[in-house]
Image (cartoon, rainbow, N blue to C red):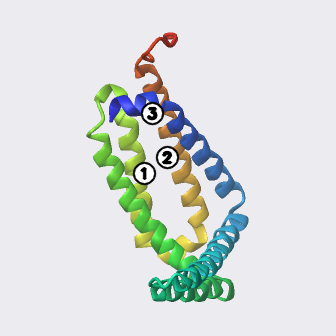
Amino acid sequence: MSDLLARNWWVVLLRGIAAILFGLAALFLPIVTLASLVLVFAAFMLADGVLSIVSAVKAARRHERWGIFILEGVVDLLVGALALLVPAAALFAFVILAGAWGLVSGVLMLVAAFRLKKGHGRLWLVLGGLAGIVWGVLLALFPLPGALVLTWWLGGFALVFGASLIALSVSLWRRRSPPSAGGAPLPA
């Protein structure tokens, strides 16, 4: 895993840059970010519902099982409509899911950190994992106030997460192995 990450250091860098840009948007445009999260979620659910029903129709034409596609499509359409009609409920659900995601991704990052060689930036992966866990715990403990300050927490997490990924990418870049099969050696 360490060598694979080192060869693909630039992917880690891009993830870090994207996280920092998202974090800045969340901090400086909190109302826009909240509204966007709910609207994007609703649009996704509506589109996914329609596409699921289209899949059901195509499956029925081929005499394949289609019932589960219809059920999924109807549920997706209902959830999308509810998110548009009752955005506060969608936002509360998002806070709970975001907290769970923070906890799970943080724990997984910590597990990955202890599988990474020390010289490849383990500390930075641990820092990102701890940030995810702290963020998830804060959302779990304070979901209602969390809905009000979700964007600030999300922005802060994204900045720490992004910075840790950028630092990790630099460490990985330093540890990358030269290309094989006649490629020019990479500068040190």
Between the C-alphas of marks 2 and 1, the distance is 7 Å
Comparing labels 3 and 1, the label whose residue is closer to the camera = 3
Q: Residue at the spot x=35%, y=35% of the render?
A: 123
Instruction: Measuring from the top left, give residue 25's x and y in whole percent.
Output: 68, 54
15 versus 26 height, above or below: above
**SS state under label 2:** helix
Q: Position of residue 76 (x, y in %)?
A: 56, 83
The three-letter amino acid code for the residue at tag 2 is: Phe
Give the percent coordinates (x, y) of residue 112. 31, 44
* Tag 3 and tag 2, C-beta contact below 8 Å: no
x 61%, y 86%: residue: 77
Choose the circle earlier in sequence order: 3 or 1: 1
Task: Tell me the residue that label 2 is attached to.
Answer: 161
Q: Secondary structure at mark 3?
A: helix
**Do the CB atoms of the residues marked 2 and 1 lie less than 8 Å apart?**
yes
Q: Is residue 97 above or below residue 107?
A: below
Residue pointed to by mark 3? 168
Residue at 62 percent of width and 88 percent of height: 82
Q: Label 2 neighbourhood size at 10 Å, few (<14), some (14-19), many (20+)?
A: many
Q: Earlier in the sequence, mark 2 or mark 1?
A: 1
User: Which is nearer the eye, 59 or 16?
Assistant: 59
Q: Nearer the viewer, residue 91 or 75?
A: 75
Query: Label 1: which residue?
Result: 131
> Reading the chain from its start, which is encountered first: label 3 or label 2?
2
**Cα distance between the residues tagged 3 and 2:** 10 Å
In the rendered image, the quadrant that contains the N terminus is: top left
Q: Secondary structure at mark 1?
A: helix
Q: Quadrant of residue 51?
A: bottom right
The location of residue 47, given as percent across then percent down, is 65, 76
Q: Label 3 crowding class (10 Å Cα cut-off): few <14, some 14-19, many 20+?
A: many
Q: Amino acid at mark 3?
A: Leu
- Furthest residue to the front? 62
